[in-house]
Amino acid sequence: MVCGAEPSFTELFAVLGDQAAQDLIRAETPDKVHCPLLADDPNKCTSCKGNPANKEKKKGEEDVDPELWREAIEDGFELFEKAELGFLRDESRVSPEEMTILRIFYREIGAHRAKSVSSAFKGK
């Protein structure tokens, strides 16, 4: 495993949480620039987006072909748009599965909209 921010990632990750052991490993290569986040917090790798261990497949995890979900996602967006435009006013016209899909879309799109609005106010 290789981490772009830490040249001794494999050795340091093996002793994650043990500040003294990590300091000894870093002392062996003083000429290299080590990750300042991990130097500050010996457990930082667990929440770091750059951690290659977080990107490895977990046992039993399968690759998902996005093509398998394309039609379902497109159907979900179409259902969401109909609801937004008021074409689904009568709940009896919506199956329980479609209602679940609508709830998921409303939650996810609402969160995305809220994030966009807050970013706009922050100037990002």
Image: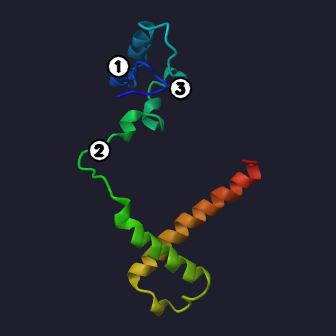
For marks 2 and 3, give the one nearer the viewer.
2
In the rendered image, which residue does mark 1 sit on? 11
Residue found 66% across the figure and 57% down from its top:
116
Q: Residues within 10 Å of mark 1 (few under 14, many from 20)?
A: few
Look at the image and tell me in which quarter the N terminus lies.
top left
Q: Earlier in the sequence, mark 1 or mark 3?
A: 1
Q: Is residue 75 above or below residue 92?
A: above
Q: Earlier in the sequence, mark 2 or mark 1?
A: 1
- Label 2 to label 1, Cα distance in Å? 21 Å
- Label 1 to label 3, Cα distance in Å? 16 Å
Secondary structure beneath disc 2?
Answer: loop
Identify which residue, 64 or 36, lies in the foreground. Answer: 64
Judged from this view, the residue extending furthest toward the left is 60
Residue found 39% across the figure and 27% down from its top:
2
Secondary structure beneath disc 3?
Answer: helix
In the rendered image, which residue does mark 2 sit on? 58
- Label 2 to label 3, Cα distance in Å? 25 Å
Residue 65 lies, in percent from the top left, at: 33, 58
Residue 10 lies, in percent from the top left, at: 35, 23
Discs 2, 1 touching: Cβ within 8 Å: no
Q: Is residue 12 above or below residue 52?
A: above
Badge 1 amino acid: Glu
User: Residue 114 vs residue 57: left or right?
Assistant: right
Q: Residues within 10 Å of mark 2 (few under 14, many from 20)?
A: few
Residue found 51% across the figure and 73% down from its top:
77
Residue 41 lies, in percent from the top left, at: 50, 25
In the rendered image, which residue does mark 3 sit on? 37
Badge 2 amino acid: Lys
Secondary structure beneath disc 1?
Answer: helix
Q: Is residue 53 above or below residue 8?
A: below
Badge 3 amino acid: Leu
Q: Is residue 115 above or below residue 81?
A: above
